[in-house]
Image (cartoon, helix red, strand yellow):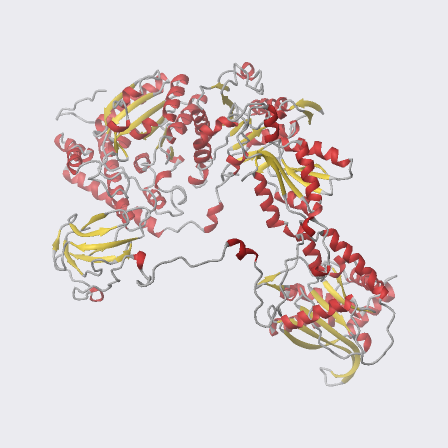
Amino acid sequence: MATRLFREAIREALIEEMDRDETVFLIGEDIGRYQGTFRVTEGLFQKYGPNRVWDTPISEPGFIAIAIGAAMEGLRPVVEVMTWSFAFLAMDQIVNHAAKILYKSGGACPVPLVIRGPAGPGKQLAAQHSHSFELWVAHSPGLKVVLPSTPADAKGLLKTAIRDNNPVMFIEHPQLYLTRGEVPDGEYTIPFGVADIKRVGRDVSIITYSRGVLLAQQAAERLQQEGIEVEIVDLRTLMPCDWETVFNSVRKTHRAIALHDDWRYCGFGAEIAAQIQEQAFDWLDAPVLRVAGADVPMPYNKYLERAAYPQVDDVIAAVRQVLT
Amino acid sequence: MQTVIMPKMGDAMEEGTLVRWLKQEGEMVKAGEPIAEIATDKATIELEAPASGILRGIRVQEGATVPINTPLAYILAEGESLPAELDRDGKPAEAPSPVPPSSVGVPPTIAPSPVPSPPVGERAETPLAPSGGEGQGVRAERILASPLARKIAREHGIDLRLLKGTGPQGRIVERDVLAYLQQRAAQPAAVAPAPAPIAARTESLNRLRQITAQRTTEAKQTIPHFYLTIEIDMEEALALRETLNRLEEGVRVSVNDLVLKACAVAIEKHPLVNASYRDGTLVYADGIHIGIAVAVDEGLLVAVVRHCESKPLLRIAQEAQALIQKAREGKLLPDEMTGNTFTVSNLGMFDIDEFAAIINPPASAILAVGAVKKVPVVMDDGSIQPRSRMKVTLSCDHRVLDGATGARFLQELKRVLENPVLIGYR
Amino acid sequence: MSTRTRTKKAALSKEEREELLELYRQMVLIRHFEQHCDRAYRQDKIGGYLHLYIGEEALAVGFISQLQPNDRVLGHYRDHGYVLALGSDPRRVMAELYGKVTGLCRGKGGSMHFYDKAHNFLGGYAIVGGVIGIATGVAFSQKYRQSDGITLCFFGDGAMNAGLLHECLNMAGLWKLPIVYIVENNKYAMGTPVELHSAVTNLAERASVYGFPSCQIDGMDVLKVREAAREIIHHVRTRQEPYFVEAITYRFVGHGAADITDPGSYRTREEIEEWRKRDPIPNLQHYLLQNGICTEQELEAIDQQAQRIVEEAARYADESADPPLDELWQHVFAD
């Protein structure tokens, strides 16, 4: 097994799928000649040429709509948004077109589309570039939502996303691009809707995804020294979501914490808490807690920024609270 | 004949008001010519004649509000006449009150003042006032307990008021209930020495008796019981038992074990016997879990043999024996005492002919088994033979089972025990 | 664009004559179909928003008559005319409007969301301007695959002011996509006249800066539309570049069936009467008779036949079943 950076694993998935299937093409801003803001598409324009790697004008609604139309005709576009914060411009295309076309056509017209790119805080990009994006899309029926936490998951899930016949929102955390991890050799894919227990424990379940997994792992290491065993459930995909694994973990530990960078108010943690109380109420020995972003626009100052989204100490404090 | 209807003029329009007729009964109209004014919530517009002809059979008066698609009148071609059932001599057949719908039903003398309501906080937290004979002035204090603690307490019949919580704000959490359970398990031994038999005195019940008292009272008061008795010929079953005990090493199959397995076989044919009643719904269990009533020094326990449907006779016999042993030693685990979907109570060893038992919820039936006795039986050929016979009585929850259902189950049980090859044994 | 003028003595081949009658047949079918829709809406058999194509028939019929099997059509929410001109089964179209499971989209799309891939209609889109992005993507796929197909994209003058239009015209020009953008300028974006919503009222001119040709045509004369479409589609197919067409047209009915303030609020009855003189159906009728191409009896027969088709479509829709309740949860995701 080789180790890869997170962004290299994504690039490998793109290369393997572009080699496998000529209908797969990349489209986005500065992904070709410039090779991508986070260098995910490095070398791909040189390798595949302008008919497979399309540099676009700065027109998110336009090029995302074009990708949707191309997908309706059986191509498999992989759109890169320079950051998901720019996808707000194209919400009509994503929510009111891509997500609705199959249903309103009575099942006749699938839209095999992937939109991928970074979303999340931590780069001092301040208010307009730091959004977590999962909620805006997970709330809309018809969209699949993927948030990998490791290079191996990123590669396997992206390959699944490209082969899926639905619009898949593939959300990468910018703080993960330079993390390194083992990636299986050879061809593999990871199915959607299968959570991964990233760490087994008996005292408390942390339900999380994306950067939250790293944070939970750091907290778990420290808590272990006190004899507290944390179980980490990495959801990996929010739609579809593997609730059964969540419930089974809670039935074992009787305590749950939902963890994400995204805003706390109406965040995915609220959905996690609601699902647990609906389906595993009798197994709870304490209220489900949420560790999530502060409900403020992201500030620029780096100390304020750190205070605006979860850090390891916040997770540890929540574990202690839920174990009281 | 063309029908003039109240047309839908807008997406949210469900009804319209006929403001006035512009044409009268019997008047000639041309297609497209305005014949009436109708008002929607948005505007007043002219209603055009859908065809040329004579306006007849006006059914809706001016000022009336009617749902869309309601026939308003008819347009007849020359020479055509209105069908008798529609002809009202020009008098409107339907004359809804010409009151705007918004004020329908509001008595004009009462001003629509808001009904005083208690402040939200109070309404949410004030305990219900005691009503009728219940409560006796006792304020029901909200007990803080986690859902898991409540679940375990419920399963073990623990009154949460007896516990002290160690969680935040004194919340009773899992560890509190588990500690209480451990403590309780240790207690029966302490009360074991039999008190001296002094007449006319009060004795506090041990915990097991307390629970038995509470549960049987509740069961007998809340479950509508009825009873069915049947007599079963046990010759064949006893022969099977004898053979098994002779040939299979290390196994002792009791009559009760035969009854347990036969019940499971019969329940598979009559699954309703295995269902339970909960809040107006029928709950079907994931398997046939048969409770055995076990008498211990402190009182009565129910030990549960799970999934009798998939276990062979010999396995059931082994498990039942082990469970009864554990029950007598006070070592039954919580899981081994709960979740029965059917119960068997056997007083045969006490030479009891027959009796009726109290249902042990959540099961909805209990089988009371009497002693196997040699009795003279008139056989089919008229001869009289000594036969081993056993009487069983099924107590049924009438919310789940009817007489016929219970009877069919007993018939099947009888058939199985009288033809024990149907039981199988491995 | 110019129209070949036909003399009275023009000798037509059998095929040419049949083509002309087919234009007439389709326009009359759309007209009767739409008139029935209006009645069915009043009877609450059709729900939601209902936008009728009455008056604009020449556009769909003229353009679509020039298509080839690999071509695609996408439209906005006034989309009944396109599917009928493309040959969709009128019974399934009506069933869709009645919300029945036998409809084009199993009763889950409705008037604004037709889709019939078998007849090359890739959708009606209910968000103003939305179709432009999707259609540009369809043309993108034709270029990507080096297909010989082209895409027709129909939208209304209101969509001229959607930012998406200008983003897509730019990319279509940049990437030389085989697409014809057709703005149906019926003079009103709902109730707002073009003079009040577009700084430049010549819409062809407004779209002329993206590096490909644009033109204005008379959308009320099906023969002129057909001639223009023939040349434009040929240009797009052979030169592999987009084309922008402003078709001047007019709707004789309200914006939607629920538009009870029309006429009166934003346009006058007189204005409608004036435009009705240019009604494409009597105009073609007149042309066919004047030039001795067919008889009145033949036209009458076409009219009767169209009415029968619509009656049959209505009967079929009436008798079809509603979608079963479990259909609610189907088609959220594809397998």
Q: Is residue C60 above or below residue B152?
A: above
Image coords of residue A96 (percent x, y): 43, 35
Image coords of residue C288 (percent x, y): 16, 32
C167, B185: nearer the viewer: B185
Q: Is residue C259 above or below residue B206?
A: above
User: Is residue B260 visible in the rendered structure shown here?
Assistant: yes
Residue at the image point whose x is 30% and y is 27% from the top: C183
User: Is residue B321 visible in the rendered structure shown here?
Assistant: no
Image coords of residue C107 (percent x, y): 39, 45
Figure disc tally: 0
Q: Is B186 placed left or right of A6 in the picture?
A: right
Q: Is A290 placed left or right of B381 in the picture?
A: left
B195, C14: nearer the viewer: B195
To which quarter of the image does residue B362 belong? bottom right
Residue at the image point whose x is 87% and y is 66% from the top: B246
To which quarter of the image does residue A213 belong? top right
Q: Which of the image's four quarters has the N terminus of chain B?
A: bottom left
